Image: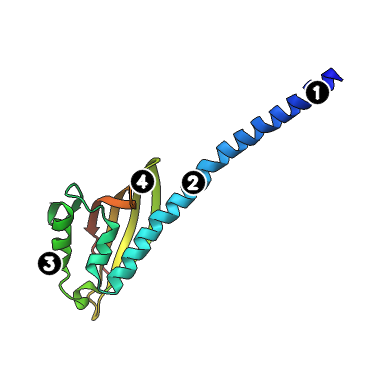
Amino acid sequence: MRSRTWVGCGLVAAAAIVAAVVGATRTPAQDRNAERKAIEQVLLEQQEAWNAGDVEKFMTGYWHSPELTFSGAGGVRRGWDAVLARYKRNYPDRAAMGDLTFSSLEVRFLGPEAALVLGQWHLSRPPDNDVGGVFSLVFQKVPNGWRIIHDHTSIVPPEPL
């Protein structure tokens, strides 16, 4: 009787260990998938805000901090206010803004609270005034969710026909 009790306890303990190991190995992947979706949601909301002509709402995807950085053809802009001013200067109206599409997104986690996102952007602007390029974004998980803390965006000229 005594050995059965120990065997039963041993089986329960082994089952608990297996469940903990399986749970531990599955949870990070599930967490990563949820985090990836949260980051992609930020970009989807930015795309929707841009296409609605709402630059301020588009900017909610960025970390609202003086430490935010944006790098592009015009150099480096530092701070949320400077990045907002850049967008307003370069895209003063709906015609200049066009319709934004993000594509070819690649999310690479750099740790539990940081990710690198590579992708392409395209602005459809009639007549035949489209522009597009590539970007690399560094996202950080801050108290109000995933936000872009650094944006490096480049224009890629269309290949000649």
Identify the residue under disc 3.
89
Is residue 158 visible in the rendered structure shown here?
A: no
Q: Residues within 10 Å of mark 4 (few under 14, many from 20)?
A: many
Q: Is tag 3's residue or tag 2's residue first in the polypeptide sequence? A: 2
Q: Is tag 4's residue or tag 3's residue first in the polypeptide sequence? A: 3
Q: Secondary structure at mark 3?
A: helix
Q: Does 98 sit above or below residue 17? A: below
Identify the residue under disc 4.
115
The three-letter amino acid code for the residue at tag 1 is Thr
Q: Does 1 sit above or below residue 75? A: above
Q: CA distance from mark 4 to mark 3?
A: 29 Å
Q: CA distance from mark 3 to mark 2?
A: 39 Å
Query: How are the residues colored?
Result: rainbow
Q: Residues within 10 Å of mark 1 (few under 14, many from 20)?
A: few
* Residue 135 placement, left or right of 83: right
* Residue 34 placement, left or right of 76: right
The three-letter amino acid code for the residue at tag 4 is Ala
Identify the residue under disc 1.
5
Contact check, label 1 and label 2, Cβ < 8 Å: no
* Residue 23 placement, left or right of 45: right
